[in-house]
Amino acid sequence: MTAVVGAQWGDEGKGKITDYLAQQADVVIRYQGGSNAGHTVVNDKGAFKLHLVPSGVFNPDALCILGPGMVVELPFLVEELDALEKAGVPTANVRVSDRAHLVLPYHLALDRLDERERGRQKLGTTGRGNGPAYSDKVGRHGIQVYEVRDEKRFRERVAHELETKNAILERFGDEPLDARAVADEVLAAAARLGGRIVDTLPLVEHALATDARVLLEGQLGAMRDLDWGIYPYVTSSNPLAGGATIGAGIPPRVITRVIGVVKAYSTAVGEGPFPTELHGSDADDLRERGQEYGATTGRPRRVGWFDAVAPRHAHRLNAFTELAVTKLDMLGRYERIPFCTSYEIDGTTTTDMPPTHVLDRVVPRYEQLPGWGSDISGITDRALLPTAAKGYLRRIEETVGAPVGIVGVGPERTATLL
């Protein structure tokens, strides 16, 4: 069983790697997060930006599960499935765990309200309601997907929750939501999904019993993990491989391969410390070359040089069996490439990840690695990479502590070197 985990701040290219590996998978499971995810996949059917649907959907023979660790906005899911079908992608292989929690319209409203009221201390969320939905889950106010099966009870639950939610919205000058309209929208989406909503545990149990090839897909990255990331600028769940065991419903011992996905440089969407961040024309150049804009929000991503401290931190937490390095082709024009190996904090050098309030004031320490000065996007054999590109990959291996097993030299599925 293989877990695909983001080893930086998110947006590392997990969608591409999952899509590639899913061609040989029997089951693909998204184990956490929700529609705040933006996994970009480019294949023979076109370019797609997935938010809720697992990136394995392009293999019609693979069962694709939205796991119980996710929070799911049912109307948004229906829209995403419809868009895939319209593009010629069959989605009959998609299932939704009935134990996942619902993202309801009031969660989106509260997400936007919270960001607005935080002002300059905003977190930079996508506004998709995930944080409030997970807050309700932890606070035992959440509504699980299976509850849509009892319409009368579901409507009562929504009306009861809206008594508190509307009081909050009105207190801050926002319009209250109508309980009937909220329930109608979600129930209509649930009706469209029909038999896709199931108890996924027997499906997972059967996969394990038959030695099926299972692929676990995470959302965001280790630096946004609720417990080990740059709190409070984090997501509301655990993207680490350990989170997959709970979020997918599998025993920990069955995960035998953990792939840490890193971009050949660093990017981030949202607020919080980002030590190697570039500004001005240097940032604009790298951002445009890499088309670094959020797949969910469209916001320009923050960009910077490769920061080995972050994926090393992720490796310590996940024990990566290998790394997948994406977008190596984006660095082909540089003669020298800054590469962060450590931080300096108050005169002391460290390769450990400090707490958020300390990370805010670290000074990244760089090596200058030779560039290869050529376009490598057409290369189909890893052995044919320029010597400097191979050296760059070796330096990633040395500083992170895990071997590079997969290299991406373009967005397409075929632009993948083993």
Image (cartoon, rainbow, N blue to C red):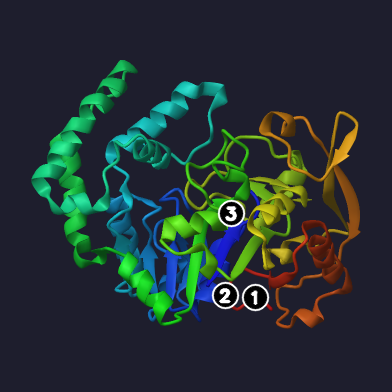
Question: Horizontal and vertical percent for residue 355?
Answer: 69, 34
Is the C-beta separation of discs 1 and 2 under 8 Å?
A: yes
* Neighbour tally class for label 3: few under 14, some 14-19, many 20 plus, Cα within 10 Å: many
Q: Which residue is mark 3?
A: 11
User: Residue drawn at (48%, 46%), measured in percent from left and top?
Assistant: 237
Q: Secondary structure at mark 2?
A: loop
Question: Horizontal and vertical percent for residue 348?
Answer: 89, 34
Q: Quadrant of residue 281?
A: top right
Q: Which residue is mark 2?
A: 413
Say above or below: 60 vs 70: below
Q: How many marks?
A: 3
Q: Quadrant of residue 85?
A: bottom left
* Image quarter (top left, top right, bottom left or bottom right) of the C terminus: bottom right
Q: Secondary structure at mark 1?
A: strand
Q: Callout 2, which amino acid?
A: Arg
* Neighbour tally class for label 2: few under 14, some 14-19, many 20 plus, Cα within 10 Å: some
281 left or right, relative to 369:
left
Question: Horizontal and vertical percent for residue 182?
Answer: 20, 40
Say above or below: 226 vs 148: above
User: How many angstroms separate mark 1 from mark 2 (CA)?
Assistant: 6 Å
Is the C-beta separation of discs 2 and 3 under 8 Å?
A: no
Q: Foreground: 135 or 246?
A: 246
395 left or right, relative to 3:
right
Q: Callout 3, which amino acid?
A: Asp
Q: Which residue is mark 1?
A: 416
Q: Callout 1, which amino acid?
A: Thr
Q: Residue furthest left?
A: 152
**Label 3 or label 1, whichever comes before in sequence order:** 3
